């Protein structure tokens, strides 16, 4: 089991997220404020808020992440390329691109290869994550799309948009790692508490995408304080 022996180590894996279509400037300000307070590695916002988020995080090392082809992924490779190009121009540090799952289910692997390659071309030098909706795929589909993403130049496999409502399965993370050991993995969707976060990190997640980052850190701190008070060892170890 991977150990996270400090709150800073946990926070550094969290991409604090708000992709609700009702998100306001105030909610983006809250993301940025908490990211600075807790030391999150990134915040994830819609393309509309990229420029604003970049201004809020000026003079910090916190990354601004945005999405392409979100949320269903069935827009054309050309459209995704244009979205990514605009996002990078506006200041995005990392791109989370939703893969075309319809194409995957249809065996149209050329379309998936093309879209990743096109987005990779305009995001050169930036982190590119490919969202595969792992909870909607069988093992063979997970292996196939992971292999395509790796060969097409992506940096990460991201498990989910979060729309399925399912928590990432540790077994899927293990499968991705075994299939493409050169790829990093971002677990996302339904990560709302410390125990879930730790379980996914233990399964191989390099990053955690969550809208509950503040609650997870606060839970960690409460447990750490309680253990210190009673001199006990619990699941923080």
Image (tube, grey):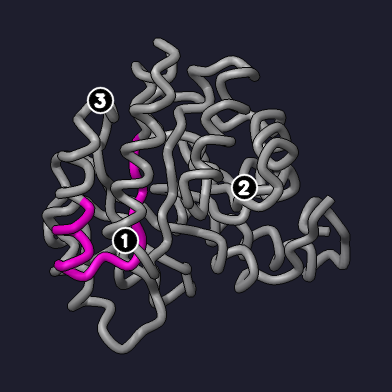
Cα gap from disc 3 to disc 2, whole angstroms: 29 Å
Mark 2 or mark 3, which is nearer the start of the sequence?
3
Height in image: 122 above or below 225?
above
Cα gap from disc 1 to disc 2, whole angstroms: 29 Å
Circle 1 sits in a helix, a strand or a loop, which is it?
loop
* Residue at the (52%, 40%) spot, across then down: 191
Q: Position of residue 235 (x, y in %)?
A: 79, 51
Q: Name the residue under label 1.
A: 123
Q: Where is residue 162 in the image (x, y as percent from the top left)?
A: 40, 33
Mark 2 or mark 1, which is nearer the start of the sequence?
1
Q: Which mark is residue 1?
A: none
Are the two marked residues, 1 and 2, in contact with CB atoms closer than 8 angstroms? no
Circle 2 sits in a helix, a strand or a loop, which is it?
helix
Q: Using the image as rendered, state which of residue 74 and residue 204 is in the foreground.
A: 74
Q: Give the range drawn in magenta.
A: 84-98
Q: Which mark is residue 197?
A: 2
Along the horizontal axis of the image, is 225 left or right of 65?
Answer: right
Among the 4 quarters of the image, the one containing residue 232 = bottom right
Height in image: 148 above or below 60?
above
* Residue at the (48%, 18%) spot, across then down: 136
Q: Mark 3 points at which residue?
A: 74
Mark 3 or mark 1, which is nearer the start of the sequence?
3
Query: Is residue 147 on the magenta stretch?
Result: no
Asked if one can make out residue 192 in the rendered structure from this viewpoint, the answer is no
Cα gap from disc 1 to disc 3, whole angstroms: 20 Å
Q: Using the image as rendered, state which of residue 25 and residue 177 is in the foreground.
A: 177
Q: In which quarter of the image is the C terminus?
A: bottom right
Along the horizontal axis of the image, is 66 left or right of 216?
Answer: left
Query: Is residue 92 on the magenta stretch?
Result: yes
How packed mark 3 is, by other alpha carbons closer than 10 Å (few <14, some 14-19, many 20 or more), is some
Circle 3 sits in a helix, a strand or a loop, which is it?
loop
* Residue at the (22%, 42%) spot, across then down: 80
């Amino acid at each position: 089991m991977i150990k996270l022996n400090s709150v800073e180590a946990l926070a550094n894996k969290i991409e604090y997220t708000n992709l609700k279509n009702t998100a306001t400037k105030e909610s983006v300000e809250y993301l940025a404020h908490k990211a600075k307070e807790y030391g999150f590695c990134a915040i994830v916002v819609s393309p509309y808020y990229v420029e604003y988020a970049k201004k809020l995080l000026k003079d910090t090392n916190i990354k601004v992440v945005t999405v392409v082809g979100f949320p269903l992924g069935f827009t054309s490779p050309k459209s995704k390329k244009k979205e990514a190009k605009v996002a990078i121009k506006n200041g995005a540090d990392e791109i989370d691109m939703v893969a075309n799952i319809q194409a995957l289910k249809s065996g149209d692997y050329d379309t998936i290869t093309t879209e990743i390659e096109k987005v990779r071309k305009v995001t050169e030098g930036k982190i590119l994550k490919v969202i595969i909706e792992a909870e909607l795929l069988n093992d063979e589909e997970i292996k196939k799309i992971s292999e395509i993403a790796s060969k097409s130049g992506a940096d990460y496999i991201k498990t989910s948009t979060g729309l399925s409502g399912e928590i990432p399965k540790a077994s899927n993370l293990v499968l991705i790692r075994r299939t493409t050991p050169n790829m990093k993995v971002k677990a996302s969707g339904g990560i709302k508490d410390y125990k879930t976060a730790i379980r996914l990190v233990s399964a191989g997640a390099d990053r955690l995408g969550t809208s509950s980052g503040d609650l997870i850190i606060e839970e960690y701190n409460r447990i750490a304080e309680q253990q210190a008070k009673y001199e006990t060892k619990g699941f923080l170890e």
